[in-house]
Amino acid sequence: AQSVAQPEDQVNVAEGNPLTVKCTYSVSGNPYLFWYVQYPNRGLQFLLKYITGDNLVKGSYGFEAEFNKSQTSFHLKKPSALVSDSALYFCAVRDMRSGAGSYQLTFGKGTKLSVIP
Amino acid sequence: GAVVSQHPSRVICKSGTSVKIECRSLDFQATTMFWYRQFPKKSLMLMATSNEGSKATYEQGVEKDKFLINHASLTLSTLTVTSAHPEDSSFYICSARDRALPGELFFGEGSRLTVL
């Protein structure tokens, strides 16, 4: 079975400092990995994805993530945090159980990021 | 990017009534849509997968007679919560797959259901 772990319920960082939100995964085959952000009472917004290619993926709003196959990690990073980055962040892996035609995602439990002014 | 519209964004209803939530793909055709439920401070729980023109596939533990899903067209899927109970109060989110953009799902803004 596929799974995603976000070990931190909450991450606090000062504005202007670099931020990292951790994610590790477990899949049987090749992983398709995603990061989404959710603001209060809103749906999920796509940030970035890794399917193949360069291990460093750049996404929206200055975020990037590094795919590390040996550590089965896909940590989300940003060089300089903004107060407006404060939100709930979800890591997700594409569920391969239902075959190539399925696009079901398995989500981590989410990490609340708070950027302190 | 592709836009998914969800309506209503908030709904309050009395116990025993039924509530319908719509999920529309505005600028693309969505052969597959997914319905999620999100509890406070929890992750998203997949409820069902909705395929256009066929019956929805429900996840284990989700009552199909209580959560009716209809995907009548390539741009619209609906979730109807029947005989609503206060424990059905939650945030419901849909997502849609754009077959022109493989490997990516687009999410609606979510619908907050409160059952009194």
Image (tube, coloured by chain):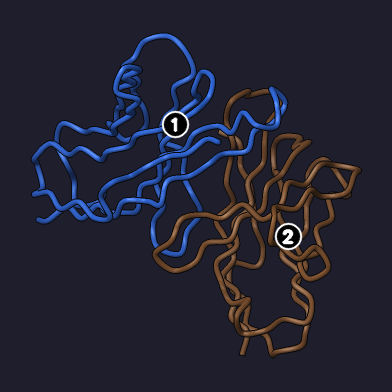
Chain colours: A blue, B brown
Which residue, given by chain and number where applicable, does mark 2 sit on? Answer: B22
- Give the x, y percent position of residue B58: 75, 53
* Residue drawn at point x = 28 percent, y = 46 percent: A7
* Amino acid identity at mark 2: Glu
Q: Alpha-carbon distance for marks 1 and 2? A: 33 Å
- Give the x, y percent position of residue B91: 55, 66
How many discs mark residues in the rendered view? 2
* Residue drawn at point x = 25 percent, y = 50 percent: A8
Q: Chain of mark 2?
A: B
| Residue found farthest to the top | A53
Residue A80 shown left or right of residue A89 in the figure: left
- Give the x, y percent position of residue A22: 27, 38
* Amino acid identity at mark 1: Ser
Say what secondary structure mark 1 lies in.
strand
Residue B69 shown left or right of residue A61 in the figure: right
Of residues A79 and B37, the one nearer the viewer is B37
* Residue drawn at point x = 79 percent, y = 48 percent: B57
* Residue drawn at point x = 34 percent, y = 14 percent: A55
Give the number of the disc on residue B104: none
- Give the x, y percent position of residue A56: 31, 17
The 10 Å Cα crowd at callout 2, few under 14, some 14 to 19, many 20 or more, is many
| Quadrant in which the C terminus of chain A is drawn | bottom left
Which residue, given by chain and number where applicable, does mark 1 sit on? Answer: A26
The 10 Å Cα crowd at callout 1, few under 14, some 14 to 19, many 20 or more, is some
Q: Chain of mark 1?
A: A
Of residues B104 and A66, the one nearer the viewer is A66
Residue B35 shown left or right of residue A27 in the figure: right
